[in-house]
Amino acid sequence: MANTAKENILKKIRQALAQPVPVPFPQSEGNDSVFQPSVQELEIEFAENFSKLLGRFSFCANQNELAEQLHTLVESRKWKNIYCVEEILKNDLTQHQFNITYSNNLHDCDASITSCEVLVARTGSIMMSTAQQSGRTTSVYAPVHICIAYTSQLVYDIKDGLQLMKEKYADSFPSLITLATGPSRTADIEKTLVVGVHGPKEVFCFLVESAQQ
């Protein structure tokens, strides 16, 4: 009986595909975004939207300033265990005098440091993927996520970021892409906003005026 019901469903699907219903409003679909870029620079657009979402934004004129600001942050918070698995990122920071001993354990670290794919200015989001050495977990399980990004990675909208990734990876497109839009938050319990339930309690973004690595 189950097979008969399944065949009836498949028959209806085949009939629907053979005689498709025309789209009632053919001009309603298109590739143009309903969101148009603002007149201000992408750096300002991202900083404003990221900060509205409780993200902590910092602009760095160069790599040396980045290292100095990271040192100041780590010392002020008295962090001892910093987790980072991206070797290129760690080597670059070390070359600019950010000398620390990195933790090998994500589950008990104070903060994690990652790079990103792009920064989305319109939503204040950090776009990451499994193609990065940090993988899926680094930016999620640490109590504090620190993202290092470059001005060349700024895009206006999500579709612009996806287009850049298509051009970058071609046939080797990552299996997962994620958007981190500020610290984790939920209001499921009695509509009270709680930060840091399903992810980091704080998200820092250090934007460096430089070409991407």
Image (cartoon, helix red, strand yellow):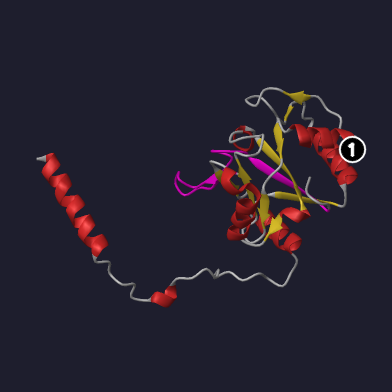
Is residue 19 visible in this depiction of the protein? yes
Residue sitting at x 88%, y 49% = 62
Q: Residue tagged by mark 1?
A: 96
Give the structural element (helix, strand or loop) at label 1.
loop
Residue sitting at x 13%, y 46% = 5
Amino acid on which disc 1 is placed? His
Per the rendered image, the range of residues in magenta is 184-209
Vertical placement of residue 37 versus 135, above or below: below
Residue 98 horizontal side relative to residue 188, left or right: right
Image coordinates for residue 61, horizontal then vertical, percent: 87, 52
Q: Quadrant of the N terminus?
A: top left
State which quadrant residue 32 falls in.
bottom right
Residue sitting at x 86%, y 33% = 94
Vertical placement of residue 110 versus 171, above or below: above
Residue 208 horizontal side relative to residue 193, left or right: right
> Considering depth in this image, is 201 or 40 the residue closer to the camera?
40
Within-10-Å neighbours for mark 1: few <14, some 14–19, many 20+: some
Image coordinates for residue 138, horizontal then vertical, percent: 63, 34
Image coordinates for residue 155, horizontal then vertical, percent: 68, 59
